[in-house]
Amino acid sequence: MTQHPIPNNCMEPQLKTNPFHTYRDPKTGEWKVVLPPPNPKPQFSPQEQRSKQDYRNR
């Protein structure tokens, strides 16, 4: 069986991180979805970081 390359038009942008964590409960066999604990430091996009730095440098 040969592998075919994926055409560029099928490539979709993917999230860098998945905010959800899934695991299977060993007792019931059900899939559980858990949110991770909140991040204490807010994360800013590179554009927001640049705008903050520009504001500080004025």
Image (cartoon, rainbow, N blue to C red):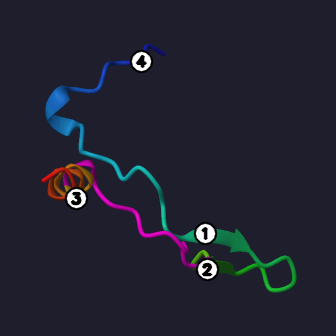
Q: For the residue labelled by badge 3, is the local secondary structure a helix, a strand or a loop?
A: helix
Left or right of residue 47: residue 16: right
| Contact, mark 1 vs mark 2 (Cβ under 8 Å) | yes
How far from the left and from the top, in percent, is residue 20?
Answer: 53, 70
Of helix, strand and loop, which one carries label 2? strand
Amino acid tagged 2: Val
Q: Residue at x 16, y 58 (%)?
A: 55
Tell which of 34 and 9 is nearer to you.
34
**Three-letter residue code for mark 4:** Gln
Q: Which residue: 49% across, 68% down?
A: 19
Residue range highlighted in magenta: 37-47
Amino acid type of the residue tagged 1 in the rendering: His
Query: Where is residue 9 drawn, in percent x and y?
Result: 14, 34
Q: Nearer the viewer, mark 1 or mark 4?
A: 1
Q: Name the residue at 43% across, 13% down.
A: 2
Q: Specify whether 15 is left or right of 29.
A: left
Mark 4 sits on what residue?
3
- Most foreground residue, 50 or 46: 50
Left or right of 41 on screen, residue 45: left
- Residue 21: mark: 1
Of the two numbered discs 3 and 2 on the same chain, state the one appearing first in sequence.
Answer: 2
> Which residue is labeled 2 in the image?
34
Q: Which residue is mark 3?
A: 52
Horizontal and vertical percent for residue 56?
Answer: 22, 57
